[in-house]
Image (spheres, rainbow, N blue to C red):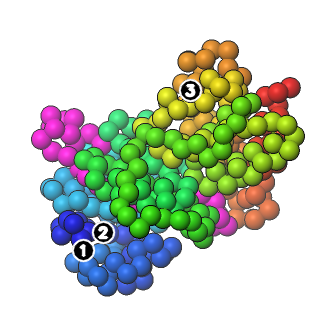
Amino acid sequence: MREDPHMLLMGQDIGEFGGPYRDFAGLHAEFGPERVRDTPVAEASTVALAVGCAAAGVRSLVSITYMDFLMMGLDPLVNYAAKLRFKTAGQLRAPVVVKTTAGANGQGVAHSQALEAWLMGVPGLKVVAPASPADAYGLLKQALREEGPVVFMDHKRLFPMAGPVSRTQEFIPFGQARMLRPGRDLTITCHSFMTVPTLAAASALADKGIEAEVLDLRSLAPLDTAAIIASIGRTGRLLTVEEGQVTCGVGAEVAFRAREALPTLRVARLGALPVPISSNPVLEAASLPDLARIVAAAQKLFA
């Protein structure tokens, strides 16, 4: 925003309050209410306004507090922003970032979904999901310089987690996965908060003699197919882990691309159970992948 004096931020409670998760703290004080705009509880209008501003040449970032409510903004995002450069032969573009928050953290059926797989199949739309402060910084820096729309997906349970961030400006190009742990026996792909139980599961598997290689996808569209295939070429087995649904999920796409490259690959998918996320904390936990389930799914690939 210092480099681009026209860039706008808009969303619910992002002004003086600094955002529901305090991720916009201090920006209202520095840039003022003309550039950091509180919006009503009207996600369809907010996304449409941000997309329209971007199409008119004013780069915009719109905050949608819960990914569940991004559904109301899909028309301007999918039918206009993602297609704009195609239907105008590149004359118009929509450099808008939709920053939203996914995942379960005790907030019930309509505030807990991970719907990133819905967005991966939209041509012209890029989707990223960081799992660390450094990746959040580098991917958001990159998102704010893209020429088309980007969905930047945070996770509620990652906000309290600290980590190092460079003092210098760093950009992470989209389409590059990150290896979190090397291994020789099994590749596990994951993204966002699922990196946390997956790394814990990899340590538990190592105690059982199984060395799992963990890949954080972090960029879902575009997807780093080359890194996935290179990893499973070494390990010969693949387990995909996600918080969203297995049916038509991120793992389904990863697994099929891998299977196309290596037809004899042993592969399994793990995601949330096919039930709405409950407001009951016991039932919420029962529906999501965790360390024990990841370990069990991995071990089945060796049976």
Point out which mark residue 222 bears. Answer: none
Amino acid type of the residue tagged 3 in the rendering:
Ile
Give the residue at x 41% y 54%.
139
Q: Are marks 2 and 1 in contact (CB under 8 Å)?
A: yes
Residue at image location 81% in from the left, 42% down from the top: 205
Give how far across and how far down residue 50 sits, in percent.
27, 60
* Cα–Cα gap, marks 2 and 1: 6 Å
Say what amino acid the circle numbered 2 marks: Leu
Which residue lies at the image location 65% right of the left edge and 25% below the top edge? 234
How far across and down, in percent of the image, does residue 150 sit?
36, 50
Which quarter of the picture shows residue 85? Answer: top left
Q: Earlier in the sequence, mark 3 or mark 2?
A: 2
- In the picture provided, is 150 more to the left or to the right than 88? right
| N-term-proximal mark, 2 vs 1 | 2
Taking depth in this image into account, of 276 and 229 the one nearest to the observer is 229
| In-image side of 23 versus 275 (left or right) | left
How packed mark 3 is, by other alpha carbons closer than 10 Å (few <14, some 14-19, many 20 or more), is: many
Magenta stretch, overall SS: loop
Residue at which label 1 appears: 35
The mark nearer the N terminus, 3 or 1, is 1
